[in-house]
């Protein structure tokens, strides 16, 4: 069955709140943890970001789909990663001449169930108050009891390990083999634009699956190690903590982004916690405490490092802070060439205020 503009759909939240709207993507029933992204552009980059695995995304900008999709250039991975999509106005037609096709066909082909015609302002206000929770979207079930039974089957994001599911299954090389620097990448759900930022800086990469033993990565003799972004609860990943602790012990430069930042924090004995509704968007202000400068950042995370533990740590120190809620946005390891940030300096499509962090890491490789 194909979606038409009159095909009804429902969105059921874990607390019983019910929204009615119109179906988009594939006709079906699917769910996950609902969260919102405040970015006004870059919807394809959002949907293909492995960090969104298991999550239903609310786009807070009013119009979605109006510029279509470009299959490869604007994708952050090889497939759509989200568990569902919610928006206000969904464009059945797109206006960009260079687009490969419509967002409707793109989502339908990927098997994504979505809903439009929702008062996303009311929905986001509800989540901001009540916190993120699981949800279910259906364009084939209308019975409330059946919907509730299906929703109850969805696991909580807290305590969920997803990196080993979304990462590469085999190690691969990327970049120029004659490049000056070699970086071993631990793929916990890495975005393509992060890897591009390294290859553009004269780096040759070997990207390894999340559960690759340290000895196998070190055998390639990289000049430094990168720990990527990814989905799920960082507290469920002792395998990654063990690998990154060995990265640190090697005394080679280490750089972590987002989930990689949280794993590096755990190596330093710091805890992580699940946030009330997380940070997802392109306009989050962060202050660099080392330079005193502020920057606008792209963010996507639902977990964070505990600030009180970092401030009293003997192993790590705070380098960046979120100016909206004073949460941890960056740290460096004392006595080591290792640092990490909670935000996304690659920021595709933008902003690019934080891309200097890639240069700082390359400087350490020298």
Image (cartoon, helix red, strand yellow):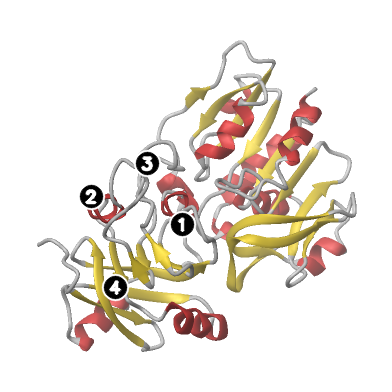
Mark 2 Cα shell of 10 Å, populated few (<14), some (14-19), many (≥20): few
Q: Nearer the viewer, mark 4 or mark 2?
A: 2
Check disc 4 and report its element: helix, strand or loop.
strand
Check disc 1 and report its element: helix, strand or loop.
helix
- Tell me residue 218's x, y (percent): 63, 25
- Tell me residue 75's x, y (percent): 43, 42
Q: Label 3 belongs to which residue? A: 70
* Label number found at residue 52: 1
Check disc 3 and report its element: helix, strand or loop.
loop
- Label whose residue precedes the other's in the sequence (2 or 1): 1
Alpha carbon separation for disc pair 3 and 2: 14 Å
- Label whose residue precedes the other's in the sequence (4 or 1): 1
Alpha carbon separation for disc pair 4 and 1: 16 Å
Residue 269 visible, this orientation: no
CB contact under 8 Å: marks 1 and 3: no
For the C terminus, the quadrant is top right
- Tell me residue 188's x, y (percent): 52, 44
Alpha carbon separation for disc pair 1 and 3: 19 Å
- Label whose residue precedes the other's in the sequence (4 or 2): 2
């Amino acid at each position: 069955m194909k979606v038409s503009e009159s095909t009804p759909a429902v969105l059921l939240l874990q607390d019983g709140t019910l929204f009615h709207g119109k179906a988009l993507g594939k006709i079906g029933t699917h769910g996950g943890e609902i969260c919102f992204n405040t970015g006004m552009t870059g919807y394809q980059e959002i949907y293909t970001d492995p960090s969104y695995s298991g999550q239903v995304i609310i786009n807070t900008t009013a119009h979605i789909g109006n510029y279509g999709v470009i299959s490869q250039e604007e994708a952050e991975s090889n497939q759509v990663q989200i568990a569902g999509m919610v928006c206000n106005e969904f464009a059945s037609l797109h206006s960009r001449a260079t687009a490969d096709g419509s967002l409707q066909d793109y989502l339908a082909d990927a098997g994504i169930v979505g809903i439009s015609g929702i008062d996303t302002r009311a929905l986001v206000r509800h989540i901001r108050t009540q916190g993120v929770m699981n949800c279910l979207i259906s364009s084939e079930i209308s019975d409330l009891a059946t919907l509730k039974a299906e929703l109850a089957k969805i696991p909580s994001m807290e305590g969920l390990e997803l990196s080993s599911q979304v990462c590469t299954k085999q190690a691969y090389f990327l970049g120029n083999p004659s490049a000056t620097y070699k970086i071993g990448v631990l793929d916990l759900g890495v975005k393509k634009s992060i890897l591009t930022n390294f290859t553009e800086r004269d780096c040759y990469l070997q990207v390894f699956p999340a559960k690759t033993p340290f000895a196998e990565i070190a055998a390639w003799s990289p000049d430094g190690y990168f720990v990527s972004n990814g989905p799920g609860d960082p507290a469920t990943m002792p395998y990654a903590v063990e690998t990154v602790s060995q990265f640190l012990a090697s005394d080679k430069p280490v750089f972590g982004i987002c989930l990689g930042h949280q794993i590096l924090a755990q190596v330093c004995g710091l805890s992580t916690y699940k946030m009330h509704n997380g940070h997802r968007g392109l306009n989050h202000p962060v202050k660099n405490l080392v330079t005193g400068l502020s920057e606008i950042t792209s963010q996507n995370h639902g977990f964070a490092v505990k600030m009180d533990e970092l401030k009293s740590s003997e192993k790590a120190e705070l380098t960046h802070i979120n100016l909206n809620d004073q949460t941890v946005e960056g740290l460096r390891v004392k006595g080591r060439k290792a640092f990490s940030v909670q935000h996304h300096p690659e920021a595709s499509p933008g902003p690019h205020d934080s891309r200097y962090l890639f240069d700082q890491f390359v400087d350490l490789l020298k």
